[in-house]
Image (spheres, rainbow, N blue to C red):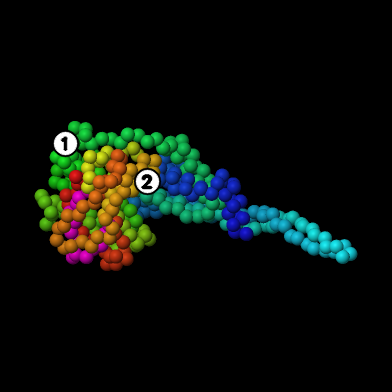
Amino acid sequence: MQKIFIFLLCLGLSGCATFGQMERGLNALQGRDVQIAFDVLGYPSGKQEFGNDIVYYWQVDSSGAILLPQTSTTTGYVGMTPVYGSTTYNQVVPVNYNCLIKLVTDDKGVIKTWEYNGNYGGCASYIKRLNRYYNQEEAPKFKTPQKIETKEAKSNMEQGNKFILFDEQSMNDKRGYVPSGWMGDYQAIKIEYNYTNNPHSGLYCQKWFYSGKKTNGQGWGGVFWQNPPNNWGNVDGGFNLSKFSKLTFWARGENGGEVLTFGMGGITGRYSDSAKAELSKIALTKEWKQYTIDLKDKNLARIIGGFFWTVNEADNPNGCTFYLDDIAYE
């Protein structure tokens, strides 16, 4: 019965790939002003405030009924000859339609992240609106990525044979990669961007803190360095890094033994990263150590997510503090 019910709902929504359309449309809204979401989805059902973040939500919760055709078969005899008959009737089946969409914005009203749950019947109207928005405004067009060989980029981010993501000279340059893509339990993450105690080189390093708490119910957290900031594949950005063969960075833990994953690329959307690579579950040492991600066989034609780190509660139940410095493509 359940399979038939789902099938009928899918027919009404022009195919069962509808939640893919939902996610595609929500990805297209990420990094945009929340007013665009109001235009697409209508006015929200409500909002909640958490520090500098605002969570807007759209909700559907209603009941209804559908008629499912049923067939019953009867058998009788005429004399010694069996006779078969069938009767078709409609059975009334109660159904619940529910959908919940949440959009999280920063203090400037820019959409940072999203989540949803529900069923096809409840989410149908939102899926159609998001799909229409994507098809009209965000139809994929692969454009040539911006190039790093421009004078401006070269003088600010490309130094010699390196493309710098973080060091003394590039730390305040917002035209390169910026640690804007906070993920998972992002409210459990804090940063001191200009930390002066024991940097690897120069005067500053980055100090990152993860509390290990499920502040957003995820059990993990992380940050993406993106170009432009808050770009989850919905904006034509990133850099062509094809001339480089590796990504290097220096890291250390507060106590040693902190377990993290580091990497680059992997952002998908209208404009997707052309590659992804990572070092999975690295146990940091208390002293500075350089790590290298080999990119020799990777297509680096467009990289929006220049660097990322992720951490999870299971590996760091009490949270962790760690430090980063001198992040660069070479």
Residue 299: quadrant of the picture:
top left
Residue position marked by numbered label 1 in the rendering: 155
Q: Nearer the viewer, residue 256 or 292?
A: 292
Q: Is residue 304 toward the left or the right of residue 82 in the image? A: left
Question: Residue 105 location in percent, x, y?
Answer: 36, 48
Point 46% across, 38% down: residue: 135
Q: Is residue 289 toward the left or the right of residue 26 in the image? A: left
Residue 187 drawn above or below residue 150: below
Q: Please report the bounds of the magenta region as a residue range.
A: 247-261
Outermost residue toward the right? 79
Spatial CA distance of label 2 from label 1 is 29 Å
Label pair 2/1, CB-CB below 8 angstroms: no
Q: Report if residue 257 is visible in the image.
A: yes
Dot label at residue 278: none
Residue position marked by numbered label 2 in the rendering: 268
Question: Residue 328 location in percent, x, y?
Answer: 19, 46
Q: Is residue 61 toward the left or the right of residue 324 in the image? A: right
Residue 254: quadrant of the picture:
bottom left
Q: Report if residue 305 is visible in the image.
A: no
Residue 137 drawn above or below residue 168: above
